[in-house]
Image (cartoon, helix red, strand yellow):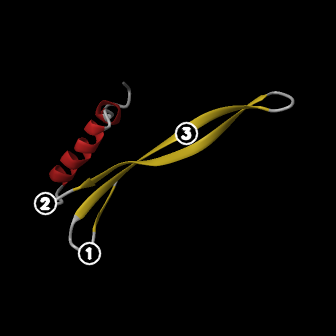
Amino acid sequence: MDMWTDMNLSSFMAVTAHWIESITTETLSRLQKILNLRADLVGFHHVPGRHDRKHLAHAFLFVTDRLDITEKVTNPLS
């Protein structure tokens, strides 16, 4: 997650997801697994108002709720 303010003093939050993708490819002699590090922008949200920790936490949870991943982010064992 990253926050910044543009030249018009509008604040934005960007949320990226990072994961490792396993791809199986067939070579002449065998099957081979390749691991690729992946990253994508999964959320971009205008955040008006204060930048205190409570307000930013609510903005982050808004993004994760819209992606239906809040439970996975807040409880990684589930």
Residue lying at 22% horizontally and 73% vertically, measured from the top left: 8
Q: Quadrant of residue 12?
A: bottom left
Q: Alpha carbon of mark 1 to alpha carbon of mark 3: how far? A: 35 Å
Residue labelled with disc 3:
20
Residue labelled with disc 1:
7
Q: Which mark is residue 49?
A: 2
Q: Earlier in the sequence, mark 1 or mark 2?
A: 1
Q: Which mark is residue 22?
A: none
Count neighbours of disc 3 (C-alpha within 10 A) and say few if under 14, some if 14 to 19, many if 20 or more: few
Image spot of residue 14 (x, y percent):
34, 54
Q: Quadrant of residue 74?
A: top left
Residue contact at pointers 3 and 2, CB within 8 angstroms? no
Give the residue furthest to the right.
29
Q: Quadrant of the C terminus?
A: top left
Looking at numbered disc 3 in the image, what kind of residue is underneath it? Ile
Asked if residue 7 is positioned above or below residue 59 in the image, the reply reads below
Image spot of residue 66 (x, y percent):
27, 38
Looking at numbered disc 2 in the image, what kind of residue is underneath it? Gly
With 35 as the anchor, is 62 left or right in this view? Answer: left
